[in-house]
Each structure stands twice: as structure tokens, then as C-alpha cells.
Image (cartoon, helix red, strand yellow):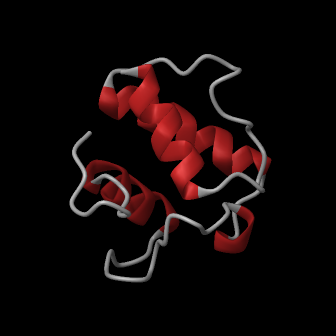
Amino acid sequence: MTRTEPDALPEPLVVLLSEHLKVTPGAGHLPPTATFESLGMDSLALMELVVAAEERFGIVLPETALDLSPSATLADAARAFADAR
């Protein structure tokens, strides 16, 4: 995945998150420090997001790559997805 700015989430991940969360992508809507919990996602919703990311990006995340908890941040997810490629 490519980054748009040094501290920004990769654009493909922003698009996927925006679709999954049904929010309009834009500056400040999905900060890298946001937790999934702060975005209203529980463990089930997070698992659904991981499956969607695996399918869209053609990756397989090992269970240890991302702490699948609502307290994980978007930056944590971006790193896990980038490492899985």
C-alpha cells in the first residue's frame, strides 16, 4: 500500500475503512491514532474488516500480526496489512 503523507494511513486502507464504516473519507475522519473502538467497532466488526482487507488486498494476516481487539489503532492495522503483503 502506498502512503499519501508520512503520518497518513495508506489510501487503499482509508477507502476500505470508509466503506466499512460508512463514513466519507476526508482529513481528520480516520486519524491513525483512532482505535477501532472509538470508531464504534466491536470484535466482530473488526474481524469482518480484516476478512474484507484480506480479500481486497490479496493478503493473509497471521493471527499474531494484529491484536484483534477494538483497542488496536488504525496505524496498528496499517502496519499489519503492510507487513502481510
22 or 61: nearer the viewer: 61
Quadrant housing residue 70:
bottom right
- Outermost residue to the front: 6
The part of the image, by quadrant, that contains residue 73 is bottom right
Q: Position of residue 40 (x, y in %)?
A: 70, 70
Name the spot of residue 36 as percent of width and height, x first.
67, 60
Horizontal side of residue 6 vs 22, given as left or right: left
| Residue depicted at x 33% and y 33% | 56
Q: Is residue 68 left or right of residue 61?
A: right
The residue drawn where x is 33% and y is 74% is: 25
Looking at the image, which residue is at 43% across and 37% down?
Answer: 53
State whether residue 38 is above or below residue 47.
below
Left or right: where 44 falls relative to 10: right
Q: Residue 47: x and y, percent?
A: 66, 38
Horizontal side of 63 relative to 24 (left or right) equals right
Q: Position of residue 20 (x, y in %)?
A: 47, 58
- Quarter of the image where the C terminus is located: top left
Quadrant location, the N terminus: top left
Q: Is residue 41 above or below residue 81?
A: below
